[in-house]
Image: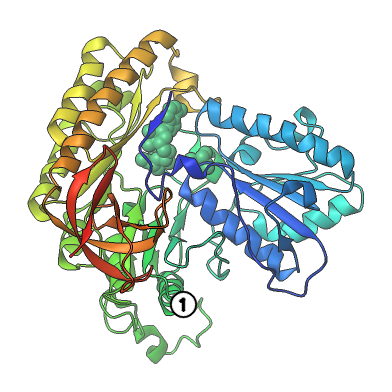
Amino acid sequence: MDLLIPDKVHDESRQGEALILEPVGKNNGRKLYIESYGCAMNFSDSEIVASILAEKGFETTSDFNNADVVFINTCSIRENAEVRVRNRLKEFAGAKFRNPGMVVGVLGCMAERLKAKFLEEEKLVDVVVGPDAYRDLPNLIDQVDSGQRAVNVLLSREETYADISPVRLNSNGINAFVSIMRGCDNMCSFCVVPFTRGRERSRDAHSVVAECKDLFDKGYREVTLLGQNVDSYKWSRPHPALSEGDGSEEDAGNKVSPAGGDFEGAAAVVNFANLLEMVALVSPELRVRFSTSHPKDITDEVLHTIAKYDNICNYIHLPVQSGNSRILDIMNRTYDREWYMNRIDAIRRIIPGCAVSTDVITGFCTETEEEHNDTVTMMDYVKYDFAYMFKYSERPGTLAAKRYADDIPEEVKQRRLAQIVAKQQEYSFYRMQARIGKVEKVLIEGFSKKSDKDYCGRSDQNAMVIFPVSEDYKPGQYVNVLVERTTSATLIGKIV
Ligand code: SAH
Ligand code: SF4
Ligand code: F3S
């Protein structure tokens, strides 16, 4: 069992969700069905895909039986993520049988990992497209229409889809994901992402800020900046001679300002702290979240920026993976236990009250009982607000698969996972209990899942808060909620 305490970015309950929108181009009479698995980046990519196809006149549908094009945006992170996709493909077979003209496409990380092999293994599939090749989708669909099966899994060093303004799918009009970078250069030994997503590249800071501003103008009140390792975001304004300007001195002087948003005056290189600040300055009414932070890269400068702006949420997802230095070393995480604790201490010092969540892998190759215990004591040290906990799943082609035997028996992985999960439940409950009697600033996201007499929204620290609807407030507004009681995952209270 993978245990997940859902939040917006890692919400497993959204897995497989079909995404809906209206066509923006001239309707071509064809319907697209797209569903997504995996991380927030994949959901964000599906919006880019829908945007590219909406330009070509595709309308989306929530029923794959009615679709002319069925896409599944896939994840390879653990074996069970891939099994889930294979099973889902079987469910599309009936629809394809009834409608032989239906185009079935596999997108995303599994497409990238398996490439053309997918076409051999899954006869149903017509098109296989990796995460950097979505601009090619209209051509690939044309190819399939003319009777060929099509593959494009080229990875790019440049593609960031910066110019594509994603259509928002299944949106509540309040929260949106904004990708700020793609790929990953870290090569954690267990991880398939560097192979499926390619080299790390940062998106043009101007386009990030412009997208956030546009979202704010459309009524959105929260953006989550996405990257596999946001702390290594680094964007340099292209050399004037290479940009569209004439390279004149005036042009060269027009530098990016981290603080301004008008991009004048200051540094020409934008790091993550600078970008956070630029987005925070879009409006004090726009909440800013981000994921994922890497313990090796999160700087005090980033922490000070979070502390400086009220609208940058006090919540950091800082995956530890293991609490043991030897395991961290063979995981190639490039930090050790002491370094991680030092980063936690810095968070506590610079942003008192900041919520921290984590990812943990149990039963990594060669992990002893004592080493596992170091993860348990790390949890005691940090008392995480949330955690996403997984059993190690060997992924073909990764460094760990090549170097180390997957030698921890399944039942041992399971027992260690259960121990970690139980520990986390204790601390989630502890963190929730500590909020009772406190007033939380909540951004109303809509009605609660269970009842339209209650609103739901999240606190600054990312806790879900439920409270009775008041006629005076609408979704998209901020309210102060006094917390009266909690479950293990939700705060319950009333507007004050
Ligand atoms: N970029 C993020 C993680 C992305 S993957 C980071 O560096 O933290 C999300 C989580 O999946 C990881 O943090 C890790 O805990 C888990 N994961 C990745 N590969 C895994 C594997 N082979 N087996 C089990 N869990 C894995
Ligand atoms: Fe994977 Fe490590 Fe990159 Fe995260 S930082 S995506 S775990 S390689
Ligand atoms: Fe999965 Fe790819 Fe994201 S492997 S977790 S969808 S980057």
Rendered location of residue 493, percent (x, y): 22, 53
* Badge 1 amino acid: Lys
Please say if 433 is above or below 248: above
Tell me the quarter of the picture where residue 334 sits: top left
Tell me the quarter of the picture where residue 142 sits: bottom right
Which residue carries the number 1 mark? 218
Q: Is residue 321 left or right of residue 380?
A: right
Rendered location of residue 347, percent (x, y): 15, 49
Q: Is residue 192 left or right of residue 341?
A: right
Rendered location of residue 2, percent (x, y): 42, 27
Q: How many marks?
A: 1
Residue for point 58% across, 53% down:
156
Quadrant that contains the N terminus: top left
Q: Is residue 43 left or right of residue 291?
A: right
Please say if 22 is above or below 281: above
The furthest residue to the right: 147
Residue 262 visible from this viewpoint: yes
Q: What element does badge 1 sit on?
A: loop
Of residues 388 and 446, the one nearer the viewer is 446
Please say if 404 is above or below 310: above
Residue for point 51% across, 62% down:
171
